[in-house]
Amino acid sequence: SVAQDIDQEILKKLKSLFKGNPTDCAVSNVIPALIKLLCRETASQKKLLMSSMLVTLFQKISTDFPEYFSQRLDILQSASEQILKCSLTDETVLGAYGQCAEKILMDSVQETTQDVSKITAIVADIAQLPTKSVSESLRKSIAQVLGRRLRALEQTNDDVSQEVPHLLSIVARLN
């Protein structure tokens, strides 16, 4: 059956995720593993199953567990990397990923978060996705997040010369 074909380990982790403890570090491996499987899979039935699992996971991460902000960022970052690595084209999954990213990025505006480099990395990954995969509202969220980051950089006197061009190049790619 399909269930047996998907690595038993992943299924176990998925079950624990749906019960819901995102601090379980296994969770952050589940999504990239599923994305990888989805990219390799040829049977449409299995593709559909993995696709719907991923959509559910992204929805869960974007709405549940607001108190685990940092873990949600980790999960999103590992998903972003894997989506780019295997050039995922599944529009449904990319859409769910985009909504999840949008929600978490907007949460990051409220958070006084130290996870700045993670947020920048996620945004840089999103900027490399095919333009049609990045919704208008996701672009707006990114603009807010980057605007806030640039303002924060202005207030610190650290050597920010490295980060600013990087942020500006992301903005340019998204426009």
Image (cartoon, rainbow, N blue to C red):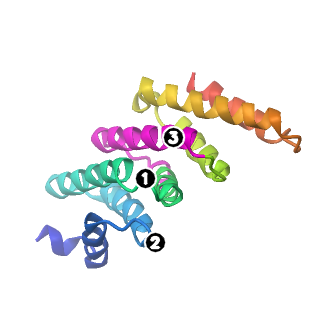
**Element type where label 1 sits in the image:** loop
Q: Position of residue 81 (x, y in %)?
A: 51, 53
Rendered residue at 63%/44% (across/down)? 120
Of 67 and 115, the residue lying toward us: 67
Disc tally is 3
Rendered residue at 54%/58% (across/down)? 70
Of 120 and 104, the residue lying toward us: 104
Residue matched to label 1:
66
Identity, as a three-letter code, of the amino acid under mark 3: Leu
Alpha-carbon neighbours of circle 1 within 10 Å: few (<14), some, or many (≥20)?
few
Q: Position of residue 36 (x, y in %)?
A: 38, 60
Indicate whether residue 84 is drawn in magenta. yes
**Element type where label 3 sits in the image:** helix
Residue matched to label 3:
105
Tell us which disc is closer to us: 1 or 3: 1
Indicate whether residue 103 is drawn in magenta. yes
Rendered residue at 43%/52% (across/down)? 66
Alpha-carbon neighbours of circle 3 within 10 Å: few (<14), some, or many (≥20)?
many
Are the residues tagged 1 and 3 within 8 Å (C-beta)?
no
What is the magenta range?
Answer: 82-111
Rendered residue at 55%/43% (across/down)? 108
Of 82 and 142, the residue lying toward us: 142
Residue matched to label 2:
25
Instruction: Decide if residue 96 is on the left or right side of residue 42.
Output: right
